[in-house]
Amino acid sequence: MSAAEYPGLPAKPGGRWKIWLAIAIIAAITAVTLAPGIGVDFSLDAIVRNWRNGAEKIGQLLVPDWSFFPRTIEPLIETLQMAVIASVIGAIVSVPLSMWAARLTNPNRITRGLVRTILNIVRAVPDLLYAAVLVAMVGVGALPGIIALVLFNVGIVVKLVSEAIESGDPGPGEAARAAGGTQTQINRAALLPDIWPPFINQALYAFELNVRASTVLGLVGAGGLGLLIDAVRTFYRYDQLALIILEILVVVVLIDWASAAMRKRLK
Amino acid sequence: MTALNTAPRTVRSAPARAITPPAKPRRPWRTVITVAITLLVVLVFWSVKVDWARTANLPADIARYLWLMFSNPAWDRVPEALWQTWRSVEMAWVGCLLGIVISFPLSFLAARGIGPAPVRLALRGLFSLIRAVPEIVIAIVILSVTGLTPLTGALALAVNGIGTLGKWGYEAIEGVHPGPIEAVKAAGGSRWQTVRWGIWPQAAPEFVSFWLYRFEINVRASAVLGLIGVGGIGDMLTSYTQYREWPTVGALLIVVIIVTIAIDLTSGAIRRRITEGSKARDLA
Protein backbone atom coordinates (compact mmCIF):
# COMPACT_ATOMS: atom_id res chain seq x y z
CA MET A 1 0.00 0.00 0.00
CA SER A 2 2.67 2.49 -0.85
CA ALA A 3 2.11 5.78 -2.59
CA ALA A 4 3.57 4.24 -5.74
CA GLU A 5 0.73 1.71 -5.94
CA TYR A 6 -1.93 4.38 -5.49
CA PRO A 7 -0.57 7.54 -7.09
CA GLY A 8 -3.45 9.70 -5.82
CA LEU A 9 -2.98 8.74 -2.18
CA PRO A 10 -1.52 11.49 0.04
CA ALA A 11 1.51 10.66 2.17
CA LYS A 12 0.83 9.56 5.73
CA PRO A 13 0.96 12.51 8.10
CA GLY A 14 4.24 12.76 9.98
CA GLY A 15 4.63 13.31 13.68
CA ARG A 16 3.95 9.73 14.79
CA TRP A 17 7.28 9.84 16.60
CA LYS A 18 5.75 12.35 19.06
CA ILE A 19 3.35 9.73 20.34
CA TRP A 20 6.21 7.26 20.81
CA LEU A 21 8.21 9.96 22.60
CA ALA A 22 5.28 10.60 24.94
CA ILE A 23 4.93 6.88 25.62
CA ALA A 24 8.68 6.63 26.29
CA ILE A 25 8.53 9.54 28.76
CA ILE A 26 5.57 8.01 30.57
CA ALA A 27 7.32 4.63 30.73
CA ALA A 28 10.47 6.28 32.09
CA ILE A 29 8.59 8.14 34.83
CA THR A 30 6.69 4.98 35.71
CA ALA A 31 9.94 3.00 35.94
CA VAL A 32 11.34 5.59 38.36
CA THR A 33 8.18 5.65 40.50
CA LEU A 34 8.32 1.87 40.81
CA ALA A 35 12.09 1.59 41.32
CA PRO A 36 13.07 -0.02 44.64
CA GLY A 37 14.36 2.45 47.21
CA ILE A 38 13.03 5.63 45.65
CA GLY A 39 9.68 4.39 44.34
CA VAL A 40 6.38 3.00 45.57
CA ASP A 41 7.24 -0.46 46.87
CA PHE A 42 5.06 -3.08 45.33
CA SER A 43 5.87 -5.48 48.14
CA LEU A 44 3.58 -8.35 47.29
CA ASP A 45 4.84 -10.47 50.19
CA ALA A 46 3.35 -7.98 52.67
CA ILE A 47 0.01 -8.31 50.94
CA VAL A 48 0.26 -12.09 51.02
CA ARG A 49 1.13 -11.98 54.73
CA ASN A 50 -1.74 -9.64 55.54
CA TRP A 51 -4.19 -11.32 53.25
CA ARG A 52 -5.95 -13.42 55.87
CA ASN A 53 -6.27 -10.49 58.27
CA GLY A 54 -7.36 -8.18 55.47
CA ALA A 55 -9.91 -10.61 54.10
CA GLU A 56 -11.46 -10.83 57.55
CA LYS A 57 -11.72 -7.04 57.77
CA ILE A 58 -13.20 -6.75 54.30
CA GLY A 59 -15.65 -9.47 55.33
CA GLN A 60 -16.66 -7.33 58.31
CA LEU A 61 -17.32 -4.47 55.91
CA LEU A 62 -20.08 -6.49 54.29
CA VAL A 63 -21.92 -6.86 57.62
CA PRO A 64 -22.61 -3.35 58.95
CA ASP A 65 -23.16 -3.04 62.69
CA TRP A 66 -26.66 -1.52 62.74
CA SER A 67 -26.66 -1.14 66.54
CA PHE A 68 -24.02 1.56 66.06
CA PHE A 69 -26.52 3.77 64.23
CA PRO A 70 -27.72 5.91 67.21
CA ARG A 71 -24.16 7.01 67.92
CA THR A 72 -23.67 8.19 64.35
CA ILE A 73 -26.65 10.55 64.24
CA GLU A 74 -25.08 13.46 66.07
CA PRO A 75 -21.79 13.44 64.09
CA LEU A 76 -23.77 13.09 60.87
CA ILE A 77 -25.81 16.19 61.71
CA GLU A 78 -22.65 18.06 62.64
CA THR A 79 -21.16 17.13 59.26
CA LEU A 80 -24.17 18.57 57.45
CA GLN A 81 -24.14 21.68 59.64
CA MET A 82 -20.51 22.31 58.77
CA ALA A 83 -21.23 21.87 55.08
CA VAL A 84 -24.25 24.23 55.11
CA ILE A 85 -22.54 26.97 57.13
CA ALA A 86 -19.35 26.83 55.08
CA SER A 87 -21.33 26.94 51.84
CA VAL A 88 -23.30 30.00 52.94
CA ILE A 89 -20.28 31.93 54.22
CA GLY A 90 -18.21 30.86 51.24
CA ALA A 91 -20.92 31.95 48.81
CA ILE A 92 -21.30 35.37 50.42
CA VAL A 93 -17.54 35.97 50.39
CA SER A 94 -17.29 34.76 46.79
CA VAL A 95 -19.58 37.42 45.26
CA PRO A 96 -17.27 40.41 45.61
CA LEU A 97 -14.16 38.29 45.08
CA SER A 98 -15.39 36.87 41.77
CA MET A 99 -16.18 40.37 40.58
CA TRP A 100 -12.68 41.46 41.51
CA ALA A 101 -11.20 38.48 39.67
CA ALA A 102 -12.97 38.99 36.32
CA ARG A 103 -11.92 41.42 33.62
CA LEU A 104 -15.42 42.67 32.78
CA THR A 105 -16.20 43.68 36.33
CA ASN A 106 -12.72 44.82 37.33
CA PRO A 107 -10.67 46.47 34.57
CA ASN A 108 -7.82 47.22 36.97
CA ARG A 109 -5.10 44.73 36.10
CA ILE A 110 -3.18 45.03 39.37
CA THR A 111 -6.02 44.29 41.79
CA ARG A 112 -7.35 41.59 39.49
CA GLY A 113 -3.97 39.88 39.31
CA LEU A 114 -3.57 40.15 43.07
CA VAL A 115 -6.93 38.51 43.81
CA ARG A 116 -6.27 35.77 41.26
CA THR A 117 -2.80 35.00 42.58
CA ILE A 118 -4.00 34.77 46.17
CA LEU A 119 -6.82 32.45 45.13
CA ASN A 120 -4.47 30.27 43.08
CA ILE A 121 -2.38 29.83 46.21
CA VAL A 122 -5.48 29.14 48.34
CA ARG A 123 -6.61 26.49 45.84
CA ALA A 124 -3.25 24.71 45.82
CA VAL A 125 -3.67 23.46 49.40
CA PRO A 126 -6.18 20.60 49.89
CA ASP A 127 -9.02 21.08 52.40
CA LEU A 128 -7.80 18.41 54.82
CA LEU A 129 -4.39 20.05 55.12
CA TYR A 130 -6.10 23.34 55.98
CA ALA A 131 -8.16 21.50 58.56
CA ALA A 132 -5.07 19.82 60.06
CA VAL A 133 -3.29 23.15 60.48
CA LEU A 134 -6.42 25.00 61.66
CA VAL A 135 -7.17 22.39 64.33
CA ALA A 136 -3.76 23.13 65.81
CA MET A 137 -4.55 26.85 65.65
CA VAL A 138 -8.10 27.18 66.96
CA GLY A 139 -8.63 23.82 68.67
CA VAL A 140 -10.72 20.73 68.00
CA GLY A 141 -14.34 21.12 66.86
CA ALA A 142 -16.58 22.23 64.04
CA LEU A 143 -14.98 25.69 63.73
CA PRO A 144 -11.67 24.68 62.06
CA GLY A 145 -13.66 22.43 59.74
CA ILE A 146 -15.92 25.30 58.73
CA ILE A 147 -12.97 27.62 58.06
CA ALA A 148 -11.19 24.93 55.99
CA LEU A 149 -14.34 24.38 53.93
CA VAL A 150 -14.86 28.12 53.42
CA LEU A 151 -11.32 28.43 52.02
CA PHE A 152 -11.91 25.42 49.77
CA ASN A 153 -15.26 26.87 48.62
CA VAL A 154 -14.03 30.34 47.87
CA GLY A 155 -11.20 28.91 45.78
CA ILE A 156 -13.56 26.92 43.58
CA VAL A 157 -16.57 29.25 43.37
CA VAL A 158 -14.54 32.36 42.56
CA LYS A 159 -12.62 30.55 39.81
CA LEU A 160 -15.73 29.14 38.15
CA VAL A 161 -17.88 32.27 38.54
CA SER A 162 -15.19 34.67 37.36
CA GLU A 163 -14.71 32.48 34.29
CA ALA A 164 -18.47 32.61 33.71
CA ILE A 165 -18.38 36.41 33.96
CA GLU A 166 -15.50 36.61 31.47
CA SER A 167 -17.33 34.50 28.93
CA GLY A 168 -20.50 36.55 29.42
CA ASP A 169 -21.92 39.28 27.22
CA PRO A 170 -19.95 42.56 27.50
CA GLY A 171 -22.90 44.47 25.94
CA PRO A 172 -24.81 45.57 29.06
CA GLY A 173 -21.59 46.70 30.71
CA GLU A 174 -20.59 48.78 27.67
CA ALA A 175 -24.07 50.32 27.52
CA ALA A 176 -23.84 51.28 31.17
CA ARG A 177 -20.35 52.72 30.62
CA ALA A 178 -21.61 54.71 27.61
CA ALA A 179 -24.38 56.09 29.80
CA GLY A 180 -21.67 57.42 32.12
CA GLY A 181 -21.78 54.88 34.93
CA THR A 182 -18.90 54.36 37.29
CA GLN A 183 -17.45 50.84 37.53
CA THR A 184 -19.40 50.14 40.72
CA GLN A 185 -22.64 51.30 39.10
CA ILE A 186 -21.92 49.22 36.00
CA ASN A 187 -21.29 46.12 38.08
CA ARG A 188 -24.30 46.69 40.26
CA ALA A 189 -26.86 47.55 37.56
CA ALA A 190 -25.67 45.93 34.35
CA LEU A 191 -23.51 42.92 35.20
CA LEU A 192 -24.73 41.57 38.53
CA PRO A 193 -28.08 40.33 37.13
CA ASP A 194 -26.15 38.12 34.67
CA ILE A 195 -23.93 36.79 37.42
CA TRP A 196 -26.64 35.33 39.65
CA PRO A 197 -27.47 32.20 37.62
CA PRO A 198 -23.88 30.90 37.29
CA PHE A 199 -23.21 31.99 40.83
CA ILE A 200 -26.11 30.01 42.33
CA ASN A 201 -25.21 27.06 40.12
CA GLN A 202 -21.59 26.99 41.31
CA ALA A 203 -22.51 27.68 44.93
CA LEU A 204 -24.77 24.61 44.89
CA TYR A 205 -22.03 22.59 43.21
CA ALA A 206 -19.62 23.69 45.93
CA PHE A 207 -22.18 22.60 48.51
CA GLU A 208 -22.18 19.09 47.01
CA LEU A 209 -18.37 18.99 47.23
CA ASN A 210 -18.58 20.31 50.79
CA VAL A 211 -20.86 17.53 51.97
CA ARG A 212 -18.39 15.01 50.61
CA ALA A 213 -15.38 16.80 52.10
CA SER A 214 -16.98 17.48 55.49
CA THR A 215 -17.47 13.76 56.16
CA VAL A 216 -13.71 13.21 56.46
CA LEU A 217 -12.53 16.49 58.02
CA GLY A 218 -12.99 14.92 61.46
CA LEU A 219 -10.07 12.59 60.74
CA VAL A 220 -7.78 15.45 61.72
CA GLY A 221 -10.02 16.55 64.60
CA ALA A 222 -12.32 19.01 62.87
CA GLY A 223 -15.71 17.58 63.85
CA GLY A 224 -18.36 15.55 62.11
CA LEU A 225 -18.41 11.94 60.95
CA GLY A 226 -14.63 11.91 60.43
CA LEU A 227 -14.07 11.89 64.21
CA LEU A 228 -16.07 8.68 64.35
CA ILE A 229 -14.20 7.20 61.37
CA ASP A 230 -10.97 7.88 63.22
CA ALA A 231 -12.29 6.22 66.38
CA VAL A 232 -13.58 3.06 64.72
CA ARG A 233 -10.46 2.65 62.61
CA THR A 234 -8.19 2.72 65.66
CA PHE A 235 -10.18 -0.20 67.08
CA TYR A 236 -10.41 -1.91 63.69
CA ARG A 237 -14.22 -1.99 63.95
CA TYR A 238 -14.76 -2.36 60.24
CA ASP A 239 -18.39 -3.39 60.76
CA GLN A 240 -19.01 0.04 62.24
CA LEU A 241 -16.95 1.66 59.50
CA ALA A 242 -19.22 -0.07 57.00
CA LEU A 243 -22.26 1.63 58.54
CA ILE A 244 -20.53 5.03 58.38
CA ILE A 245 -19.59 4.50 54.73
CA LEU A 246 -23.19 3.55 53.96
CA GLU A 247 -24.40 6.74 55.64
CA ILE A 248 -21.91 8.83 53.65
CA LEU A 249 -23.12 7.15 50.46
CA VAL A 250 -26.78 7.82 51.22
CA VAL A 251 -26.24 11.43 52.27
CA VAL A 252 -23.94 12.25 49.35
CA VAL A 253 -26.24 10.67 46.78
CA LEU A 254 -29.34 12.38 48.24
CA ILE A 255 -27.70 15.81 48.39
CA ASP A 256 -26.26 15.44 44.88
CA TRP A 257 -29.66 14.47 43.58
CA ALA A 258 -31.48 17.36 45.31
CA SER A 259 -28.85 19.87 44.28
CA ALA A 260 -28.78 18.63 40.68
CA ALA A 261 -32.59 18.87 40.50
CA MET A 262 -32.46 22.42 41.84
CA ARG A 263 -29.68 23.43 39.41
CA LYS A 264 -31.61 22.01 36.47
CA ARG A 265 -34.68 24.08 37.41
CA LEU A 266 -32.61 27.24 37.66
CA LYS A 267 -31.27 26.93 34.14
CA MET B 1 -39.10 65.33 35.34
CA THR B 2 -42.73 66.45 35.04
CA ALA B 3 -41.82 68.78 32.22
CA LEU B 4 -40.27 65.88 30.33
CA ASN B 5 -43.34 63.72 30.80
CA THR B 6 -45.87 66.30 29.74
CA ALA B 7 -43.93 67.47 26.69
CA PRO B 8 -44.91 64.69 24.25
CA ARG B 9 -48.54 64.83 25.33
CA THR B 10 -48.99 68.22 23.70
CA VAL B 11 -47.63 66.83 20.44
CA ARG B 12 -49.75 63.70 20.37
CA SER B 13 -53.38 64.25 19.53
CA ALA B 14 -54.68 60.98 20.98
CA PRO B 15 -55.96 61.20 24.55
CA ALA B 16 -53.49 60.09 27.15
CA ARG B 17 -54.20 56.63 28.47
CA ALA B 18 -53.03 55.27 31.74
CA ILE B 19 -50.44 52.62 30.99
CA THR B 20 -50.75 49.56 33.18
CA PRO B 21 -47.53 47.62 33.22
CA PRO B 22 -47.91 43.85 33.01
CA ALA B 23 -48.16 42.18 36.39
CA LYS B 24 -44.92 40.86 37.80
CA PRO B 25 -44.66 37.14 37.19
CA ARG B 26 -45.66 35.25 40.28
CA ARG B 27 -43.47 32.41 41.37
CA PRO B 28 -45.01 31.02 44.53
CA TRP B 29 -42.72 27.96 44.57
CA ARG B 30 -39.63 30.05 44.32
CA THR B 31 -40.75 32.08 47.34
CA VAL B 32 -41.54 28.93 49.31
CA ILE B 33 -38.15 27.41 48.51
CA THR B 34 -36.30 30.62 49.31
CA VAL B 35 -38.04 30.97 52.67
CA ALA B 36 -37.49 27.30 53.50
CA ILE B 37 -33.78 27.47 52.68
CA THR B 38 -33.36 30.69 54.65
CA LEU B 39 -35.07 29.15 57.68
CA LEU B 40 -32.92 26.04 57.37
CA VAL B 41 -29.73 28.09 57.22
CA VAL B 42 -30.75 30.16 60.25
CA LEU B 43 -31.60 26.98 62.13
CA VAL B 44 -28.23 25.44 61.26
CA PHE B 45 -26.30 28.54 62.33
CA TRP B 46 -28.24 28.62 65.57
CA SER B 47 -27.93 24.92 66.40
CA VAL B 48 -24.30 24.19 65.51
CA LYS B 49 -21.92 23.70 68.40
CA VAL B 50 -19.61 26.59 67.65
CA ASP B 51 -18.76 29.29 70.14
CA TRP B 52 -19.38 32.23 67.81
CA ALA B 53 -18.09 34.66 70.43
CA ARG B 54 -14.69 33.04 70.04
CA THR B 55 -14.58 33.96 66.36
CA ALA B 56 -14.14 37.63 67.33
CA ASN B 57 -10.42 37.24 68.00
CA LEU B 58 -10.01 34.65 65.26
CA PRO B 59 -8.50 37.01 62.66
CA ALA B 60 -5.87 38.18 65.15
CA ASP B 61 -5.06 34.57 66.08
CA ILE B 62 -4.74 33.48 62.48
CA ALA B 63 -2.56 36.48 61.65
CA ARG B 64 -0.31 35.58 64.59
CA TYR B 65 0.04 31.96 63.40
CA LEU B 66 0.64 33.06 59.81
CA TRP B 67 3.44 35.26 61.13
CA LEU B 68 4.88 32.32 63.11
CA MET B 69 4.74 30.12 60.01
CA PHE B 70 5.92 32.42 57.27
CA SER B 71 8.07 35.12 58.92
CA ASN B 72 11.02 32.72 59.15
CA PRO B 73 10.25 29.36 57.52
CA ALA B 74 12.59 26.51 58.41
CA TRP B 75 14.41 26.29 55.09
CA ASP B 76 16.68 23.52 56.34
CA ARG B 77 13.68 21.15 56.26
CA VAL B 78 13.08 21.77 52.57
CA PRO B 79 15.25 18.87 51.26
CA GLU B 80 13.31 16.38 53.38
CA ALA B 81 10.05 18.06 52.40
CA LEU B 82 10.94 17.69 48.72
CA TRP B 83 11.72 14.02 49.23
CA GLN B 84 8.34 13.47 50.94
CA THR B 85 6.63 15.44 48.18
CA TRP B 86 8.26 13.13 45.66
CA ARG B 87 6.76 10.17 47.55
CA SER B 88 3.33 11.82 47.34
CA VAL B 89 3.70 12.57 43.64
CA GLU B 90 4.75 8.94 43.07
CA MET B 91 1.57 7.78 44.76
CA ALA B 92 -0.39 10.14 42.55
CA TRP B 93 1.34 8.90 39.38
CA VAL B 94 1.07 5.17 40.09
CA GLY B 95 -2.53 5.59 41.27
CA CYS B 96 -3.37 7.54 38.13
CA LEU B 97 -1.81 4.90 35.81
CA LEU B 98 -3.56 2.02 37.56
CA GLY B 99 -6.84 3.93 37.42
CA ILE B 100 -6.39 4.56 33.69
CA VAL B 101 -5.56 0.93 32.93
CA ILE B 102 -8.61 -0.37 34.78
CA SER B 103 -11.10 2.33 33.83
CA PHE B 104 -10.21 2.47 30.13
CA PRO B 105 -11.95 -0.74 29.00
CA LEU B 106 -14.71 -0.24 31.58
CA SER B 107 -15.64 3.18 30.23
CA PHE B 108 -16.15 1.69 26.76
CA LEU B 109 -18.35 -1.05 28.20
CA ALA B 110 -20.35 1.62 30.06
CA ALA B 111 -20.99 3.72 26.96
CA ARG B 112 -24.31 3.62 25.16
CA GLY B 113 -24.14 1.68 21.90
CA ILE B 114 -21.15 -0.47 22.90
CA GLY B 115 -21.80 -2.32 26.13
CA PRO B 116 -24.97 -4.39 26.71
CA ALA B 117 -27.58 -2.60 28.86
CA PRO B 118 -27.19 -4.62 32.11
CA VAL B 119 -23.38 -4.27 32.06
CA ARG B 120 -23.73 -0.59 31.28
CA LEU B 121 -26.10 0.11 34.18
CA ALA B 122 -24.05 -1.96 36.62
CA LEU B 123 -20.85 -0.13 35.67
CA ARG B 124 -22.46 3.30 35.90
CA GLY B 125 -23.81 2.42 39.34
CA LEU B 126 -20.34 1.26 40.38
CA PHE B 127 -18.74 4.48 39.13
CA SER B 128 -21.15 6.71 41.05
CA LEU B 129 -20.82 4.58 44.21
CA ILE B 130 -17.04 4.93 44.09
CA ARG B 131 -17.28 8.65 43.48
CA ALA B 132 -19.44 9.12 46.58
CA VAL B 133 -16.79 7.66 48.94
CA PRO B 134 -13.88 9.98 49.81
CA GLU B 135 -10.49 8.49 48.82
CA ILE B 136 -9.22 8.69 52.38
CA VAL B 137 -11.98 6.29 53.47
CA ILE B 138 -11.06 3.94 50.62
CA ALA B 139 -7.47 4.09 51.85
CA ILE B 140 -8.58 3.17 55.39
CA VAL B 141 -10.35 0.11 54.00
CA ILE B 142 -7.42 -0.94 51.81
CA LEU B 143 -4.76 -0.50 54.49
CA SER B 144 -6.09 -3.54 56.35
CA VAL B 145 -4.58 -5.58 53.52
CA THR B 146 -1.59 -3.54 52.38
CA GLY B 147 -0.55 -1.81 55.60
CA LEU B 148 0.59 1.78 56.03
CA THR B 149 2.65 2.06 52.85
CA PRO B 150 2.64 4.37 49.83
CA LEU B 151 1.19 1.42 47.90
CA THR B 152 -2.01 1.80 49.94
CA GLY B 153 -2.22 5.41 48.88
CA ALA B 154 -1.66 4.54 45.24
CA LEU B 155 -4.31 1.82 45.32
CA ALA B 156 -6.83 4.13 47.02
CA LEU B 157 -6.25 6.76 44.34
CA ALA B 158 -6.59 4.10 41.65
CA VAL B 159 -9.94 2.92 43.02
CA ASN B 160 -11.21 6.47 43.34
CA GLY B 161 -9.88 7.21 39.85
CA ILE B 162 -11.97 4.40 38.37
CA GLY B 163 -15.08 6.27 39.50
CA THR B 164 -14.20 9.61 37.91
CA LEU B 165 -12.25 8.36 34.89
CA GLY B 166 -14.95 5.81 34.06
CA LYS B 167 -17.63 8.49 34.11
CA TRP B 168 -15.67 11.02 32.05
CA GLY B 169 -14.73 8.20 29.68
CA TYR B 170 -18.23 7.09 28.79
CA GLU B 171 -19.37 10.70 28.55
CA ALA B 172 -16.56 11.42 26.09
CA ILE B 173 -17.40 8.32 24.05
CA GLU B 174 -21.09 9.20 23.92
CA GLY B 175 -20.23 12.76 22.92
CA VAL B 176 -18.37 11.85 19.72
CA HIS B 177 -19.78 12.72 16.33
CA PRO B 178 -21.81 9.76 14.95
CA GLY B 179 -20.67 10.28 11.35
CA PRO B 180 -17.37 8.34 11.44
CA ILE B 181 -19.07 5.49 13.37
CA GLU B 182 -21.72 5.18 10.66
CA ALA B 183 -19.02 5.32 8.00
CA VAL B 184 -17.10 2.43 9.60
CA LYS B 185 -20.32 0.41 9.96
CA ALA B 186 -21.30 1.14 6.35
CA ALA B 187 -17.89 -0.09 5.22
CA GLY B 188 -18.61 -3.36 7.03
CA GLY B 189 -16.54 -2.76 10.16
CA SER B 190 -16.96 -5.01 13.18
CA ARG B 191 -17.80 -3.66 16.64
CA TRP B 192 -14.12 -3.60 17.56
CA GLN B 193 -13.23 -1.79 14.32
CA THR B 194 -15.99 0.76 14.99
CA VAL B 195 -14.46 1.50 18.38
CA ARG B 196 -10.90 1.63 17.03
CA TRP B 197 -11.50 3.72 13.89
CA GLY B 198 -14.88 5.40 14.46
CA ILE B 199 -14.73 6.42 18.11
CA TRP B 200 -11.16 6.37 19.40
CA PRO B 201 -9.62 8.94 17.01
CA GLN B 202 -12.32 11.42 18.02
CA ALA B 203 -12.26 10.71 21.74
CA ALA B 204 -8.49 10.34 22.20
CA PRO B 205 -7.65 14.02 22.87
CA GLU B 206 -10.38 14.23 25.48
CA PHE B 207 -9.20 11.02 27.15
CA VAL B 208 -5.59 12.17 27.38
CA SER B 209 -6.79 15.53 28.64
CA PHE B 210 -8.82 14.14 31.53
CA TRP B 211 -6.13 11.60 32.37
CA LEU B 212 -3.81 14.53 32.97
CA TYR B 213 -6.52 16.35 34.90
CA ARG B 214 -6.97 13.29 37.10
CA PHE B 215 -3.22 13.35 37.79
CA GLU B 216 -3.60 16.95 38.99
CA ILE B 217 -6.42 15.84 41.30
CA ASN B 218 -4.29 12.94 42.54
CA VAL B 219 -1.40 15.24 43.43
CA ARG B 220 -3.68 17.12 45.83
CA ALA B 221 -5.32 13.95 47.10
CA SER B 222 -2.02 12.17 47.71
CA ALA B 223 -0.92 14.98 50.02
CA VAL B 224 -4.15 14.42 51.97
CA LEU B 225 -3.68 10.64 52.16
CA GLY B 226 -0.50 11.20 54.15
CA LEU B 227 -2.72 12.26 57.05
CA ILE B 228 -3.64 8.64 57.83
CA GLY B 229 0.02 7.65 57.82
CA VAL B 230 0.72 6.18 54.38
CA GLY B 231 3.72 8.45 53.95
CA GLY B 232 4.40 11.52 51.86
CA ILE B 233 4.13 15.21 52.52
CA GLY B 234 0.80 14.97 54.37
CA ASP B 235 2.34 12.60 56.90
CA MET B 236 5.23 14.99 57.54
CA LEU B 237 2.90 17.98 57.76
CA THR B 238 0.64 16.40 60.40
CA SER B 239 3.60 15.37 62.56
CA TYR B 240 5.08 18.86 62.60
CA THR B 241 1.64 20.41 63.15
CA GLN B 242 1.19 18.21 66.19
CA TYR B 243 4.62 19.25 67.52
CA ARG B 244 3.50 22.83 66.80
CA GLU B 245 6.74 23.57 64.95
CA TRP B 246 5.26 26.44 63.03
CA PRO B 247 8.35 27.50 61.01
CA THR B 248 8.57 23.94 59.62
CA VAL B 249 4.82 23.87 58.88
CA GLY B 250 5.25 27.13 56.99
CA ALA B 251 8.12 25.74 54.90
CA LEU B 252 6.13 22.56 54.15
CA LEU B 253 3.08 24.56 53.05
CA ILE B 254 5.27 26.64 50.75
CA VAL B 255 6.66 23.44 49.18
CA VAL B 256 3.15 22.00 48.75
CA ILE B 257 1.86 25.18 47.13
CA ILE B 258 4.80 25.58 44.73
CA VAL B 259 4.87 21.93 43.66
CA THR B 260 1.08 21.79 43.18
CA ILE B 261 0.97 24.99 41.14
CA ALA B 262 3.99 23.88 39.05
CA ILE B 263 2.37 20.52 38.23
CA ASP B 264 -0.98 22.21 37.49
CA LEU B 265 0.66 24.69 35.12
CA THR B 266 2.65 22.02 33.27
CA SER B 267 -0.26 19.65 32.99
CA GLY B 268 -2.63 22.47 32.02
CA ALA B 269 -0.26 23.58 29.23
CA ILE B 270 -0.03 20.03 27.87
CA ARG B 271 -3.83 19.64 28.05
CA ARG B 272 -4.38 22.88 26.13
CA ARG B 273 -1.82 21.81 23.53
CA ILE B 274 -3.64 18.48 23.08
CA THR B 275 -7.20 19.79 22.92
CA GLU B 276 -6.56 23.04 21.03
CA GLY B 277 -3.54 22.12 18.88
CA SER B 278 -0.46 24.24 18.30
CA LYS B 279 -0.71 27.93 17.54
CA ALA B 280 2.04 27.81 14.89
CA ARG B 281 0.22 25.26 12.78
CA ASP B 282 -2.89 27.46 12.64
CA LEU B 283 -0.89 30.26 11.06
CA ALA B 284 0.80 28.08 8.45
Image: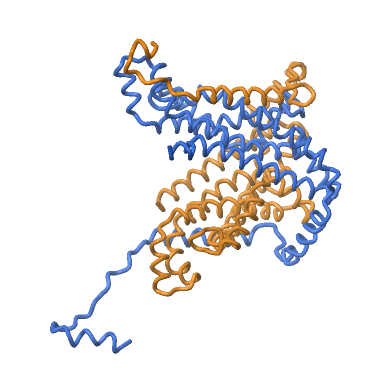
Chain colours: A orange, B blue
Residue A118 at x, y percent in the picture: 65, 55
The N terminus of chain B, quarter of image: bottom left
User: Is residue A122 placed above or below B149 in the rendered structure?
Assistant: below
Residue nearest the observer in this picture, A106 or B17: A106
User: Is residue B63 placed above or below A35 in the rendered structure?
Assistant: below
Left or right: B64 in relation to A178: right
Residue B138 at x, y percent in the picture: 65, 32
Residue shown at the point (54%, 61%) measured from the top left: A95
User: Is residue B95 placed above or below A166 in the rendered structure?
Assistant: above
Instruction: Say whether residue A231 is visible.
Output: no
Residue B70 at x, y percent in the picture: 79, 54
Query: Residue A138 appears in which quarter of the rendering?
Result: bottom right
User: Is residue A185 placed above or below A196 in the rendered structure?
Assistant: below
Query: Residue A154 appears in which quarter of the rendering?
Result: bottom right
Q: Residue furthest bottom?
A: B3
The C terminus of chain B, quarter of image: top left
Left or right: B116 in relation to A154: left
Instruction: Say whether residue B82 is visible.
Output: yes
Residue B114 at x, y percent in the picture: 40, 22
Left or right: A95 in relation to A243: left
Residue nearest the observer in this picture, A151 or A112: A112
Number of numbered callouts drawn: 0
Residue nearest the observer in this picture, A35 or A89: A35
Residue nearest the observer in this picture, A231 or A95: A95
Residue shown at the point (46%, 59%) measured from the top left: A195
Left or right: B181 in relation to B158: left
